[in-house]
Image (cartoon, rainbow, N blue to C red):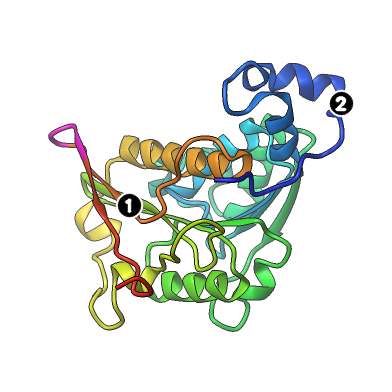
Amino acid sequence: MQPLVAPAPALDPAELVRTARHAVLAGIGEEGQRRLSAAHVAVVGAGGVGSPVLLALAAAGIGTITVIDDDVVELTNLQRQLAHRVEDIGRPKTASAARAITALSPDADVLLATERLDSENAERLFAGADIVVDTSDSFATRRDVAAATEALGIPLVWGAVQEWHAQATVFWSNPPESDPVVLTDLFPLGTEGEPPSCAQVGVLGALCVQVGGMLATEVVKLITGAGEPLLGRLAMIDALTSRQHEIAIRSAVSA
């Protein structure tokens, strides 16, 4: 797949040193790092999966990161939400996430949306973004995120974790070289139900980190054109058995 983002001008010397291991990595290199610097990624949720996504994107050198979350940090979050600390309890998650991003990548431009995403504001919150990452935990929000990214024609990197199990994929209503694959291809309207909350069934904190890393990797690949994205493929993880497999997602357009 062709790179999604055009490269930025030359990086400053400190950023060149900070990201030096990307510069020698096949598939990224110096030009790919400049693509990462030019990219704008919006992340929905700064919780269990969103936290490691945000940290990984900041470390990777993404130039602009929008953080969208209306919640505050609670003590029970800290088992899995690695962007936050005990001293952040009671603060907006967007604020503590911004601090963590800036501590890793001082050059990053961090945009905060401390509000609940819905069908009315989603396109506004995604304005200017090259990619959206959805780490939300309700299907109402996932539907709103998917509808907005489909309308804007931008990729949606999507992940979900529950108990010991996880899923990850990429949706895109307007990919340049393949059929579109969207959320309704995986979950037709009216079929998904509402998953139980973490408070009801629990969630493995380490699995959130694993899936967050997977989603951040998909973002890097799309921006730089490296490798093969998960578009049209759903990765499924069973942490209890340490097994991962995938299934194809059939596009309704090509059906």
Q: Name the quadrant containing residue 138.
A: bottom left
Which disc, if any, is residue 233?
1
- Residue at coordinates 35% horizontally, 74% vertically from top-left? 184
Judged left or right of residue 114, residue 198 is left
Q: Which of 113 and 3 is in front in this view?
A: 3
Name the image quarter holding the N terminus. Answer: top right
Where disc 1 sits, the SS reads strand
The amino acid sitting under disc 2 is Asp
How packed is label 2: few (under 14 Cα within 10 Å), some, or many (20 or more)? Answer: few
Q: Position of residue 160 (x, y in %)?
A: 34, 54
Residue bearing the label numbered 2: 12
Q: In the picture provided, is 95 more to the left or to the right than 43?
A: right
Image coordinates of residue 180 in percent, x first then y, are 45, 66
Q: Hey, what amino acid is under mark 1?
A: Arg
Q: Residue at x 63, y 32 (%)?
A: 60
Residue situated in front as seen by the camera: 23 or 123: 23
Does 109 sit left or right of 166 as displayed? right
Q: Is residue 118 above or below residue 77?
A: below
Q: Between tags 1 and 2, which lies in front?
A: 1
* Residue 218 placement (x, y as % from top left): 49, 43
Tell me where the magenta segment starts and ends, as one range.
Answer: 240-244
Does 181 sit above or below residue 220? below
Mark-to-mark CA distance, 1 and 2:
37 Å
Of the 4 image quadrants, the one containing the C terminus is bottom left
Q: Which residue is depicted at the point 59% across and 68% down?
A: 153
Q: Is residue 52 something that shows in the picture?
A: no
Q: Where is residue 84 in the image (x, y as percent from the top left)?
A: 54, 41
- Magenta segment, principal secondary structure? loop
Residue 243 magenta-drawn? Answer: yes
**Mark 1 or mark 2, which has the lower sequence index?**
2
Category of crowding for the residue at label 1, using alpha-carbon neighbours closer than 10 angstroms: few (below 14), some (14–19), many (at least 20): some
